Image: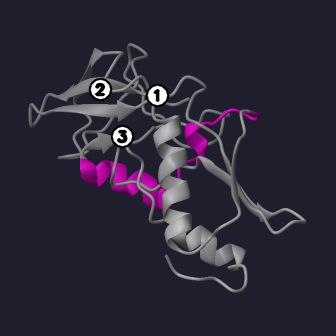
């Protein structure tokens, strides 16, 4: 483990955290997922990383905390505390644009709306059903297969153009 004689700058720590993948969707970092809410030093020089899980019962929370700790310790951080921050609750609005693009490239459709009533355009068919573009071929001719996908935060859709099934990251 490298020896650190002075504490790393906060921007440098954020850069290291951008390399920590989400264990359930490894193409997106914990930073791009928006679950790392804050990074700061306490008066005693303990580095604190505040993490908000995607939902309070997320089974990956401990793995994420362990991965963050391992990554920072590998960079020589000795005094570290991972803080679980539940308020405000995580929302898909916190996904970065880079994270949304990485989800799409991986074959997961990112949220097509904002959870907090933002202005992101939402396509709706005449029957009021949300249109989720296929992340593989960009077709809007898709249908909901199941409200429950591979993880609780995703739904299962199928494209009627390329016939491929895909996950849709639910707006939370």
Point 29% across, 26% down: residue: 150
Q: Check residue 127 in the rendering and tell me which mark sits there, or answer none.
A: none
Q: Residue 24 has which mark?
A: 3
Indicate the quadrant containing the C terminus: top left, top right, bottom left or bottom right: top right
Q: Specify which label sits upstream in the sequence, 1 or 3.
A: 3
**Which residue appears farthest toward the right when viewing the image?**
43
Q: Is 101 inside the magenta-drawn segment? A: yes
Q: Earlier in the sequence, mark 2 or mark 3?
A: 3
- First in sequence, mark 1 or 2: give its number: 1
Q: Range of the magenta residues?
A: 87-106
Horizontally, residue 85 falls left or right of residue 149, namely right
Determine whether 152 is above or below 36 in the image. Answer: above
* 2 is higher (above) or lower (below) than 69: below
Q: Which residue is mark 1?
A: 59
Reading the image, the residue beneath label 2 is 150
Secondary structure beneath dot 2 equals loop
Q: Residues within 10 Å of mark 2 (few under 14, many from 20)?
A: few
Q: Quadrant of residue 8?
A: bottom right
Q: Residue at x 40, y 54 (%)?
A: 28
Observer-side mark, 1 or 3, equals 1
65 versus 12 height, above or below: above
Looking at the image, can residue 30 be seen?
A: no
- What element does badge 1 sit on? loop
Residue 121 higher or lower than 81, as above or below: above
Q: Residues within 10 Å of mark 3 (few under 14, many from 20)?
A: few
Q: CA distance from mark 1 to mark 3?
A: 10 Å
The image position of residue 45, as x and y in percent, is 81, 69
Q: Quadrant of residue 101?
A: bottom left
- 61 or 115, nearer to the observer: 61
Which of the two marks, 1 or 2, is nearer to us in this view? 1
Residue occupying the point 55% across, 39% down: 92
Q: In the rendered structure, are the residues bearing label 1 and label 2 in contact, judged by CB atoms less than 8 Å apart?
A: no
């Amino acid at each position: 483990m490298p020896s650190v004689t002075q504490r790393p700058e906060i921007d440098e720590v954020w850069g290291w955290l951008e390399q920590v993948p989400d264990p359930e969707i490894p193409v997106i970092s914990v930073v791009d997922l928006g679950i790392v809410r804050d990074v700061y030093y306490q008066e005693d020089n303990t580095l604190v990383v505040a993490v908000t899980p995607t939902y309070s019962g997320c089974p990956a929370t401990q793995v994420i905390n362990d991965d963050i700790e391992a990554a920072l310790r590998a960079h020589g951080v000795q005094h570290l505390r991972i803080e679980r921050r539940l308020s405000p609750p995580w929302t898909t609005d916190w996904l970065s644009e880079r994270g949304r693009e990485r989800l799409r490239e991986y074959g997961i459709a990112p949220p097509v709306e904002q959870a907090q009533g933002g202005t992101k355009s939402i396509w709706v068919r005449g029957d009021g059903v949300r249109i989720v573009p296929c992340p593989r071929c960009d077709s809007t001719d898709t249908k909901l297969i199941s409200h429950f996908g591979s993880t609780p935060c995703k739904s299962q859709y199928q494209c009627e153009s390329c016939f491929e099934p895909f996950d849709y990251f639910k707006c939370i």
